[in-house]
Image (cartoon, rainbow, N blue to C red):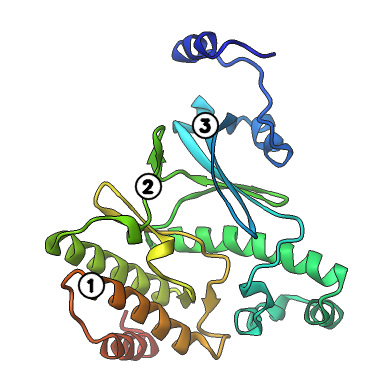
Amino acid sequence: MHLHPAAQRDLESKGIYAETTVGVPELDVFVDQGLITRVHAQLTSGKEGTVYCCRAHPSTRRRYLAAKVYRQHAEGTHKRDPTYFEGRERELKARTIRAIQAGSAFGRAVANGLWVGAEYDNLRRLAVAGASTPAPIALQGRAILMEFIGNGAGPAPHLHGVKLDREAAESLYEQVMCDIARMLRRHLVHGDLSPYNILVWEGEARIIDVPQVVDARFNRAAPELLRRDVENVCSFFAQHGVTVDPSGVTDELWRRYQRAEL
């Protein structure tokens, strides 16, 4: 059923939703589940996947939701890097690990599934940790439905594109560092944190893109990944007058983590 946009808006204003298809097959299941009604806009498209802004079903008590659809054969940099894979092999059979390392068709399919599932699981773990990340809503196949950060006019801007005065920069810096500490308290290190995967909405920083998050208990590279995350954050905010010692910050975070003082 296809209605004129004005007629569709009139129905929706009365809480009546016409049957619709979203035009993205991977998202049809979320329509069937009564979570979304249609795609509002395509937001980004990259090598790993595409992100959409979707109109949420009234039952969700949200106006919009974000849907991230991974490409079937996405070749992301992190998925090819053994640094991020260490610790995940605990739940896999030796044959599967060899297939992933060899880059076979089966191995790539398994790795892609692991990546999608990892992002959803990490979003759930981060929500429990109290970190400012999008709330996960549902997972199906290669698609993740999550909280949308923004409004009908568009998504929240990335940190690197926001004009900041000293006061705003200090506030956002403290928020990001608190989230890094909250994550680490739950043994989690983002591993790729930068101004390009931090959104700013209504004065709050929101961390996104978390499939590569590593577990500090099982990944030997966790201290160095944490150090890189902190350096990236400090380097950006230094440009806005927030001067700190990233090495000192990292060392203190890791020391408190090891002593369970976070």
Residue at the outermost left position: 167
Residue at 79% of width from left, 77% of height from top?
100
The image quadrant where one finds the N terminus is: top right
- Disc 3 marks a residue whose amino acid type is Ala
- Frontmost of labels 2 and 1 is 1
Kindly identify the amino acid type of the residue bearing the numbered disc 1: Gln
Q: Is residue 91 left or right of residue 93?
A: left
Q: Label 3 to label 2, Cα distance in Å?
A: 17 Å
x, y percent for residue 26: 71, 42
| Three-letter amino acid code of the residue under disc 2 | Ala
Q: Is residue 236 left or right of residue 110?
A: left
The image position of residue 98, as x and y in percent, is: 83, 82
Depth order, front residue of 67/59:
67
Give above or below for 191 relative to 249. above
Q: Which residue is mark 1?
A: 239
Question: Dots 3 and 2: beta carbons under 8 Å?
Answer: no
Instruction: Give how far apart the Cα atoms at labels 1 and 3 are.
Output: 38 Å
Q: Which residue is mark 2?
A: 156
Q: Position of residue 62 (x, y in %)?
A: 44, 33
Compared with residue 200, is residue 98 higher up or lower down, i.e. above or below? below
Residue at the (29%, 77%) spot, across then down: 234
Residues at marks 2 and 1 touching, judged by CB atoms closer than 8 Å? no
Describe the element under mark 3 as helix, strand or loop.
Answer: strand
Residue 180 picture location, percent across and down = 36, 72
Q: Camera-side residue: 125 or 78?
A: 78
Q: Quadrant of residue 101?
A: bottom right
The residue wearing badge 3 is 56
**Label 2 element class:** loop
Closer to the observer: label 1 or label 3?
1
Q: CA distance from mark 2 to mark 1?
A: 21 Å
**Mark 1 / mark 3, whichever is N-terminal:** 3
